[in-house]
Amino acid sequence: MFSMFTKRNLIRSSDRQPSFITFLSTKAGLMFRRTSIKMLNCYVIAFILVFSPFIAISNASAGDADPRYRNCVEQCEGSGCIGKRYFPNCKISADEVPVIGPPWGMVEPLYARWKKGHCKSNCQYYCMINREKERELLNKDPEKYHGKWPFKRIYGIQDPASMVFSSLNLVMHFHGWMSFFTLIYNKLPLKARKRPYYEYASLWHIYGLLSLNSWFWSAIFHCRYCELIEKLDYFSAVALLGYSLILAILRSFNVKDEATRVMIPAPLISFVATHIMYLNFFKLDHEWSLKVCLAMTVAQLATWAIWGGVSHHPSRWKLRFVVLISGLAMCLQIYDFPPYEGILDAQALRHAITVPLTYLWWSFIRDDATFLTTERLKNSKKSK
């Protein structure tokens, strides 16, 4: 009887065990989710507290809010004329088909079409130039239009200095990324399946792609202002700055765990995505976007500066130099000034400064990959 009773109890307990384990696992899962939500809320609150000083109500630029400028643009888009200038692209029918175009069988040269540009862009540009001439006669300072200073076009290029320096930054990032790629996969030793010992290789590859994308659209945008290209330029810059901040945090704190690598960037990714959607679907606010970019830049530089000050990295002097000069270059973005002779402004100077810094920055990244790979190999030999 005792054996039968014990056997029955064991069978009953074994029958109940799976449900009990399921209950525990479900409860543990709920607790984990609640903890994760609490941690995420803490991150969001901390993020808002850090960035709240940059939040302010911003309006349109003073130039494009000028009634005389607005009337000029409206009349130009309706008639296609500003004084003696005539823009055929402004003659648009209800079906958005040009009323006046090249004769049948003739194809307008691509360069001529590019130089002529869009109706809105041309109207805004020449209305801006005329309005600034009027203001100059009254001894008034230049004003920004749609968040940008009035520049003089050269061969149809809207902002030639920034376009040239953006292109140089694009070339320098391509050179730096390719040299990093060559170092990782051709010069440094690899693990099985050709995986690098450097844990941050994939993160830097993404950084390289985002940098190329950002500077490409920056160069295109400074060639000729266009609403679509302007949005792509802004979105690419915000995405690059947000990812750079994430990368700075992960590298500075030496984060290797995959779960932590996902949890830390989550609030930042949410914020950047929300900001991009706000600019795209609600309002392309230049002043607000500038403050967001400055806030992320300050946070990124502060993270690198603290790590560069306390670490014993063999190439820490490169990091410190890049952070210092980048901080000074950021001041040009804060203390903006009108373009000299309508060509060189603070943003163009900042782009010029970042060209040599980009070369030094990728040099530090290569040194970091070499340093950590050497350390990992030493540790693996000691463990054996």
Image (spheres, rainbow, N blue to C red):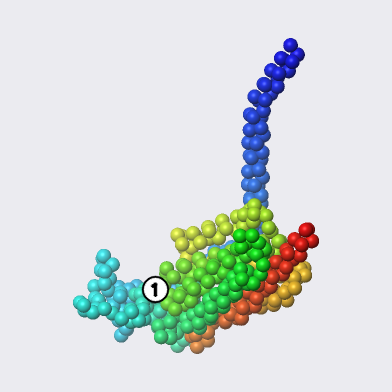
Q: Which residue is mark 1?
A: 70
- Residue 352 locus on image (x, y percent): 57, 81
> Observer-nearest residue: 144 or 141?
144
Residue at x 63%, y 39% (from the top left corner): 30
Q: Assign a secondary structure to mark 1.
A: helix
Residue 41 visible in image? yes
Residue 327 visible in image? no
Q: The C terminus is located in which quarter? A: bottom right
Residue at x 45%, y 84% (from the top left corner): 152
Residue 186 position (above or below residue 134): above
Q: The N terminus is located in which quarter? A: top right
Mark 1 surroundings: few (<14), some (14-19) or many (≥20) residues within 10 A: some
Mark 1 belongs to which amino acid?
Arg
Q: Locate residue 382 relative to residue 76 in the image: left or right.
A: right
Q: Locate residue 382 relative to residue 87 in the image: left or right.
A: right
Residue at x 61%, y 68% (from the top left corner): 185
- Residue 125 locus on image (x, y percent): 40, 79
Q: Locate residue 61 relative to residue 35 in the image: left or right.
A: left
- Residue 75 locus on image (x, y percent): 32, 75
